[in-house]
Image (cartoon, rainbow, N blue to C red):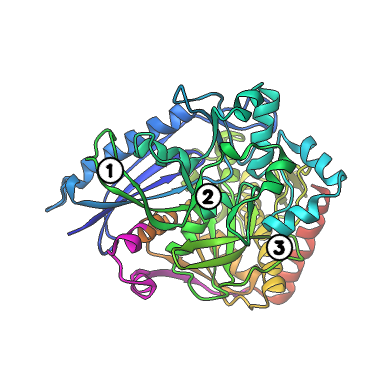
């Protein structure tokens, strides 16, 4: 029996899963790593800590898999990678090490540089080439900041440095430093790739002052890009065969193969993607145009809307306010009240993403009275996470022309029945939960399995997807309208 090893390198930790050919999990491991916040609005990761979290979680997954009858590490036929996007590691080719902490996708330090580019009037051209707005979210200004503010520009222009997205970092690690490559979905998030040619753009590299020599080779999301070499715990020669940014992998893992299919992943943030097939849909409502995935003979595109804070807001209830001891308690607490008692929460801790794109916005709680309790705040947080997604999904409908009848959900916070039901109510569409909530890592495994022939085709993958729960709208239209009206007023104040 063939096995697939899938790596999900996320914002707060690394998961490794081992699947059999039926996508049944036979082993898994997870390790968190430190988040570094040197200044307000700045978020960094240590590449060595990411590396260690990968090895530790993989060791745990392999140990658990060995308890499965018939499993042997030499029967792992392929490896899939999915990862946090936009995060950048500055790497020294000669020393074989990172030079600075990685700048994370949430980081807002390049807001002044982005504002200057907007003032220069280049935003329309950048969006035309990349499908992206100029924003600190994406990688290009992060790379330039590292070169200019940390004094690395001269060595970069001499060809000594590399800019590694996290998938490229892991590919390099898995191949003993022999392969320098990123897949098209991750490349599309740097703000340096031309969406039409699927290659690095000299025009964009010049605009953002990023030497093209720093950038990896762009590959498809489902192909053998290299094989393992000198990886602790794995034999040499296992193909690395699937790569996609986490949200693209989740769309694939949710079997959203039909135009108009949409999913929302609730992780640190909330990320919504809609399949637009082979159409590059230029958004007129504040969304991102991006690759969904690239196969060897075809490319599928998507509309995306990202809310920077989702599950992180529930974590804040635990770590910041101390009103819950674990994130799993939030549903129980919120369910002790019938509604939020007039409390409204806008989760703009890192600014507002799509469709508003307001990096200066900040989170607010409004409507507090003497009668407000921690239960009202907990419920307002869950409702705020759901309401910000309504703005994104409505924009998707307007841009794409597709009517949303259902949205597939995944990620940790998708386990909240209360939030899923409220989401269905205010959106007016079914919310569908799969049997496997970790759709990102499923997508990575599927892309790898497709490349090496474990799965025959997309239809075979579609048959593997299993529905586990469905939430249908049930709220009175007048109440929905009231929620949306008050939400709009709260966002205006953020």
Q: Nearer the viewer, mark 1 or mark 3?
A: 1
Extreme residue toward the front, this view: 158
Q: Nearer the viewer, residue 465 or 382?
A: 465
Image quadrant in which you'd find residue 254: bottom left
Q: Read off the residue under disc 1.
A: 61
Q: For the residues marked 1 and 3, what is the alpha-carbon distance in whole angstroms?
A: 39 Å
Q: Residues within 10 Å of mark 3 (few under 14, many from 20)?
A: many
Residue at 21%, 47% (x, y): give it. 65
With respect to residue 9, does 419 lie above or below?
Answer: below
With respect to residue 267, does 390 lie above or below?
Answer: below
Provide residue 18's location: percent of width, then percent of height.
28, 50
Q: Residues within 10 Å of mark 1 (few under 14, many from 20)?
A: many
Magenta segment boundaries in residue numbering = 448-474
Question: Is 138 placed left or right of 8 in the picture?
Answer: right
Q: Quick one: SS at disc 3? A: helix
**In magenta segment, residue 461:** yes
* Mark 2 / mark 1, whichever is N-terminal: 1
Q: For the residues marked 2 and 1, what is the alpha-carbon distance in whole angstroms?
A: 21 Å
Provide residue 316's location: percent of width, then percent of height.
59, 39
Q: For the residues marked 3 and 2, what is the alpha-carbon distance in whole angstroms?
A: 18 Å
Q: Read off the residue under disc 3.
A: 391
Q: Nearer the viewer, residue 165 or 261?
A: 165
**In magenta segment, residue 336:** no
Q: Read off the residue under disc 2.
A: 267
Residue at 70%, 57% (x, y): give it. 129
Q: Quick one: SS at disc 2? A: loop
Can you tell which mark lies on residue 436?
none
The reply to whether residue 342 is visible in this rendering is no
Q: Nearer the viewer, residue 361 or 166?
A: 166
* Mark 3 / mark 2, whichever is N-terminal: 2
């Amino acid at each position: 029996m063939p096995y697939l090893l899938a790596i999900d390198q996320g914002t707060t930790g690394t998961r490794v899963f081992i699947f059999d050919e039926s996508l049944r999990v036979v082993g898994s491991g997870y390790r968190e790593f430190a988040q570094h916040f040197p200044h307000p609005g700045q978020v960094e990761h240590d590449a060595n800590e990411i590396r260690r979290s990968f090895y530790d979680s993989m060791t745990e997954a392999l140990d658990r898999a060995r308890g499965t009858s018939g499993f042997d590490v030499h029967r792992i036929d392929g490896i899939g990678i999915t990862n946090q996007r936009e995060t950048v590691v500055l790497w020294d080719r000669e020393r074989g090490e990172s030079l600075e902490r990685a700048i994370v996708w949430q980081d807002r330090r390049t807001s002044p540089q982005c504002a200057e580019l907007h003032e220069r009037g280049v935003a329309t051209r950048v969006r035309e080439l990349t499908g992206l707005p100029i924003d600190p979210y994406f990688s290009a200004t992060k790379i330039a900041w590292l070169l200019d503010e940390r004094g690395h520009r001269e060595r970069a222009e001499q060809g000594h440095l590399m800019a590694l997205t996290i998938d490229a970092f892991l590919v390099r690690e898995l191949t003993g430093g022999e392969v320098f490559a990123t897949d098209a979905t991750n490349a599309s998030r740097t703000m340096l790739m031309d969406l039409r040619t699927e290659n690095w753009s000299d025009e964009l590299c010049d605009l953002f002052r990023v030497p093209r020599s720093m950038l990896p080779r762009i590959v498809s999301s489902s192909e053998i890009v290299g094989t393992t070499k000198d990886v602790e715990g794995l034999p040499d020669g296992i193909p690395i065969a699937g790569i996609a940014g986490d949200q693209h992998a989740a769309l694939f893992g949710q079997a959203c193969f039909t135009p108009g299919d949409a999913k929302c992943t609730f992780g640190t943030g909330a990320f919504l993607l809609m399949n637009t097939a082979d159409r590059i849909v230029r958004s007129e409502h504040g969304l991102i145009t991006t690759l969904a995935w690239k196969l060897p003979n075809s490319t599928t595109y998507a509309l995306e809307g990202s809310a920077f804070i989702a599950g992180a807001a529930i974590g804040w209830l635990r770590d910041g306010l101390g009103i819950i001891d674990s994130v799993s308690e939030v549903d129980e607490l919120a369910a002790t009240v019938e509604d939020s008692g007039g409390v409204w929460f806008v989760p703009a801790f890192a600014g507002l993403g799509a469709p508003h794109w307001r990096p200066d916005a900040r989170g607010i709680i409004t409507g507090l009275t003497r009668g407000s309790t921690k239960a009202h705040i907990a419920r307002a947080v869950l409702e705020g996470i759901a309401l910000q997604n309504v703005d994104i999904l409505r924009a998707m409908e307007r841009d794409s022309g597709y009517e949303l009848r259902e949205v597939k959900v995944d990620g940790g916070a998708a386990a909240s029945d209360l939030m899923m039901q409220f989401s269905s109510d205010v959106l007016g569409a079914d919310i569908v939960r799969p049997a496997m909530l970790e759709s990102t890592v499923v997508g990575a495994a599927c892309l790898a399995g497709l490349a090496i022939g474990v799965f025959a085709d997309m239809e075979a993958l579609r048959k593997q997807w299993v529905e586990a729960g469905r939430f249908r709208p049930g709220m009175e239209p007048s109440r929905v309208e009231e929620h949306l009206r008050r939400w709009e007023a709260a966002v205006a104040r953020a």
